[in-house]
């Protein structure tokens, strides 16, 4: 079995009477030659690593080696407990977990690239929020990772997931799209609704540039991960309500690819444009380089 588009994915789900996660598991078994139990066990290991990154990040107040990030997950966690959050438990929890993961990455901790290290906070953010608020089992979360993998597989093969290749729309945009679709599947949505959520989320981040301050995956990357979780939940809610993307998902992915190709080099992870070239961005870079020398 080979899936090359979201259209083919929906058709496969309908013909096989399987979820998107189950199609991914089937395809991986065919490609790798491993049995499904082994593949599931390997994915369980990745979920555990995600949880460890969340747990470590939630209680760590230390700064990253660069000194430009760190400690915000603890602040967000404290704010959550105050009961003053405007976004409700699903999103505020996801924001905390996303911060925790991204800050763990900045501290050189172990994370799971979903689909990249720079966008690694979004998927665990939404997954563990569902676990906390819905009681979604770890078994179901593992299947959610297969759903996200299938969506990411199509996106990566039809476009790109690298900020250097296509801007942050390719990293945070893809991760947010994957997370949105995963939420829908875990909440019992149809494959068509999953794909609509994926399209809606991706459309919301088209054109997002990759402009890391001092070339580090911290500013503005970490907070973009956080915002991605809220977009993922919004897109999922729309799809579950029956709202559809007017532009088919495959065409949205194609648009993302074309936008990335047209994006100037200065806005594709080179730290030569955008926020990286603001007065503060340049000062941070100078201070970091002076400290190292």
Image (cartoon, rainbow, N blue to C red):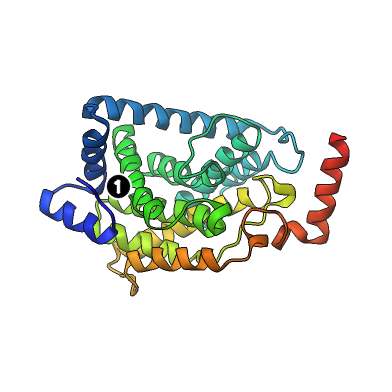
Residue in front for this viewpoint, 79 or 230: 230
Residue 122, image x and y in percent?
49, 47
Residue in front for this viewpoint, 15 or 130: 15
Q: Which residue in the structure is indicated by mark 1?
A: 186
**Quarter of the image that includes the C terminus:** top right
Residue 203 relative to residue 251: left or right: right
At horizontal 69% and vertical 34% (from top left) the residue drawn is: 61
Residue 62, image x and y in percent?
71, 32
Residue 249, image x and y in percent?
34, 65
At horizontal 52% and vertical 44% (from top left) the residue drawn is: 121
Whether 97 is drawn above or below 91: the answer is above
Q: Residues within 10 Å of mark 1 (few under 14, many from 20)?
A: many
The total of numbered circles placed on residues is 1
Residue 39 relative to residue 255: left or right: left
Q: Can residue 103 be seen in the rendering of this structure?
A: yes
Image quadrant where residue 41 sits: top left
Image quadrant where residue 76 sits: top right
């Amino acid at each position: 079995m080979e899936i090359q588009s979201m259209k083919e994915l929906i058709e496969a789900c309908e013909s096989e009477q399987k979820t998107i996660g189950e199609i991914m598991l089937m395809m991986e078994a065919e490609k790798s030659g491993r049995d499904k139990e082994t593949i599931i066990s390997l994915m369980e290991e990745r979920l555990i690593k995600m949880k460890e990154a969340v747990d470590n990040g939630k209680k760590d107040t230390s700064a990253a080696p660069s000194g430009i990030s760190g400690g915000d997950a603890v602040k967000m966690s404290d704010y959550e407990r105050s009961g003053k959050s405007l976004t409700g438990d699903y999103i505020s929890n996801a924001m905390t977990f996303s911060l925790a993961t991204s800050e763990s990455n900045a501290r050189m901790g172990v994370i799971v690239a979903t689909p990249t290290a720079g966008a690694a906070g979004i998927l665990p953010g939404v997954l563990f929020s569902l676990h906390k608020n819905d009681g979604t089992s770890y078994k179901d979360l593992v299947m959610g990772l297969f759903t996200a993998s299938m969506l990411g597989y199509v996106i990566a093969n039809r476009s790109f997931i690298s900020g250097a290749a296509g801007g942050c729309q390719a990293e945070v945009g893809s991760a947010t799209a994957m997370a949105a679709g995963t939420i829908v599947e875990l909440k019992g949505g149809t494959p068509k609704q999953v794909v609509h959520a994926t399209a809606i989320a991706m459309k919301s981040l088209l054109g997002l540039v990759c402009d890391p301050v001092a070339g580090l995956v911290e500013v503005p990357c970490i907070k973009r991960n956080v915002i991605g979780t809220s977009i993922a939940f919004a897109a999922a809610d729309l799809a579950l309500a029956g709202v559809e993307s007017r532009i088919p998902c495959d065409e949205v992915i194609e648009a993302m690819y074309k936008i990335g190709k047209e994006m100037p080099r200065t806005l594709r992870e080179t730290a030569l444009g955008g926020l990286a070239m603001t007065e503060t961005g340049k000062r941070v870079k100078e201070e970091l380089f002076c400290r190292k020398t």
